[in-house]
Image (tube, rainbow, N blue to C red):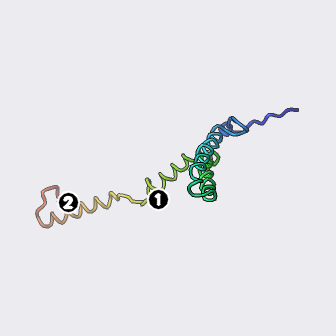
Amino acid sequence: MIEIRIPKEINEYKERLFLSFTLRQTLSIVGILAINVPLWWLVAPIIGNDLAGWICIINAPIIGAIGFYRPNGMPLEKYIGFIFVTTFIYPPNRAYKTDNIFEEIALIIDREREAAERGGSRGFKLGKR
């Protein structure tokens, strides 16, 4: 009997385009080839095959990660954007500061009493009537 695999979550479904790769993965493979092949042909005669090969080996996983690596189910560029925002834009340690209104009111009342005792109060007077 033929069985069809149905994903449990519809958001997990990815349409396969070429050789069971998604469009994103196919474009990253094309990008790797489009960058590394000309890089090899241009750089290898100048710096040698060995060093040019290492440059291509280091360059390929970086470009491939964009298409294949999905941390927390997000594309890599969105994940890097979140890391940048939480690291550099928003403060990592948030200070918990409160304004104690009752303390401020008590300070205002104390100042008014002191001013009233000195006799130079222009506002309302607190205390005995």
Q: Residue at x 24, y 61 (%)?
A: 109
Spatial CA distance of label 2 from label 1 is 46 Å
Q: Which quadrant is the C terminus positioned in?
A: bottom left
Q: Position of residue 61 (x, y in %)?
A: 63, 52
User: Which image quadrant is residue 54 in?
Assistant: bottom right
The amino acid type found where label 2 is placed reads Leu
In front: mark 2 or mark 1?
1
Of residues 48 and 38, the one drawn nearer to the viewer in this rendering: 48
Label 2: how many Cα within 10 Å (few below 14, some 14–19, many 20+) = few
User: Which image quadrant is residue 18 in?
Assistant: top right
* Vertical arrangement, residue 34 with respect to residue 108, above or below: above
Q: Which residue is mark 1?
A: 92
Residue at the front extreme of this rendering: 45
Label 1: how many Cα within 10 Å (few below 14, some 14–19, many 20+) = few
* Vertical arrangement, residue 43 with respect to residue 18, above or below: below
The amino acid type found where label 1 is placed reads Pro
Residue at the left extreme of this rendering: 120
2 and 1 marks in contact (CB < 8 Å):
no
Q: Which quadrant is the N terminus positioned in?
A: top right
The secondary structure type at the circle numbered 1 is loop
Q: Position of residue 7 (x, y in %)?
A: 73, 38
Residue at the top extreme of this rendering: 2
Q: Which residue is mark 2?
A: 126
The secondary structure type at the circle numbered 2 is loop
Q: Earlier in the sequence, mark 2 or mark 1?
A: 1
Q: Is residue 11 left or right of residue 46?
A: right
Of residues 6 and 84, the one drawn nearer to the viewer in this rendering: 84
Q: Residue at x 13, y 60 (%)?
A: 121
Of residues 89 and 43, the one drawn nearer to the viewer in this rendering: 43
Q: Is residue 22 left or right of residue 5?
A: left
